[in-house]
Image (cartoon, rainbow, N blue to C red):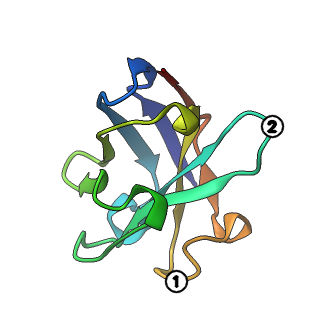
Amino acid sequence: QVQLVESGGGLVQAGGSLRLSCAASGRIFSSYTLAWFRQPPGKEREFVAAISWSGGSTTTADSVKGRFSISRDNAKNTVHLQMNSLKPEETAVYYCASKQAYRGLGRVDDYDYWGQGTQVTVSS
């Protein structure tokens, strides 16, 4: 069992930055792929970024490439999402998720564990 708790969400103006964090506990955190998803109001959950267990591989959605970056600290059992140049349409609940394999990263149903989410609101 893996427990995930997100933090760092809030209200930010368009063009601003936020850094989300996800603290993990439970089973061996360092062996899991970690990812961030987001769910805008009234829309489906969508993939944002993922990082392999070693941190050596990262994948980001085309829509956030160059603005968002994912990192992890296995010693502290945390994963971060640095978000820069935020846009109003990126207002959403942001979720941390984990799975074992570093493949099928965009498939929501492939993830074993989810956090409760943190709200990010980008004002225009």
Q: Which residue is mark 2?
A: 42
Q: Is residue 34 left or right of residue 85?
A: right
Give above or below for 37 relative to 4. below
User: Where does the image place residue 26, in percent across and percent down from the top left?
Assistant: 47, 49
Does dot 2 land on a helix, a strand or a loop? loop
In depth, the one of 18 and 85 nearer the eye is 85
Residue drawn at x 22%, y 45% is 76
Residue drawn at x 29%, y 31% is 17
Give above or below for 45 relative to 54. above
Residue drawn at x 49%, y 35% is 5
Quarter placement of the N terminus: bottom right
Q: Is residue 43 left or right of residue 123?
A: right
Q: What crowding class fits label 1: few (fewer than 14 Cα within 10 Å), some (14-19), or many (20 or more)?
A: few
Q: Which residue is mark 1?
A: 103
User: Where does the image place residue 9, in percent across and percent down from the top left?
Assistant: 44, 25
Residue drawn at x 74%, y 67% is 109
Q: Is residue 100 left or right of residue 116?
A: left
Res 108 → quadrant: bottom right
User: Where does the image place residue 10, in percent across and percent down from the top left?
Assistant: 45, 18
Q: Is residue 61 visible?
A: no
Q: What crowding class fits label 2: few (fewer than 14 Cα within 10 Å), some (14-19), or many (20 or more)?
A: few
In depth, the one of 37 and 64 nearer the eye is 64
Q: How many marks?
A: 2
User: Where does the image place residue 83, in percent across and percent down from the top left?
Assistant: 33, 41
Q: Give the residue type that dot 2 points to.
A: Gly
* Circles 2 and 1 in contact, beta carbons < 8 Å: no
Does dot 1 land on a helix, a strand or a loop? loop
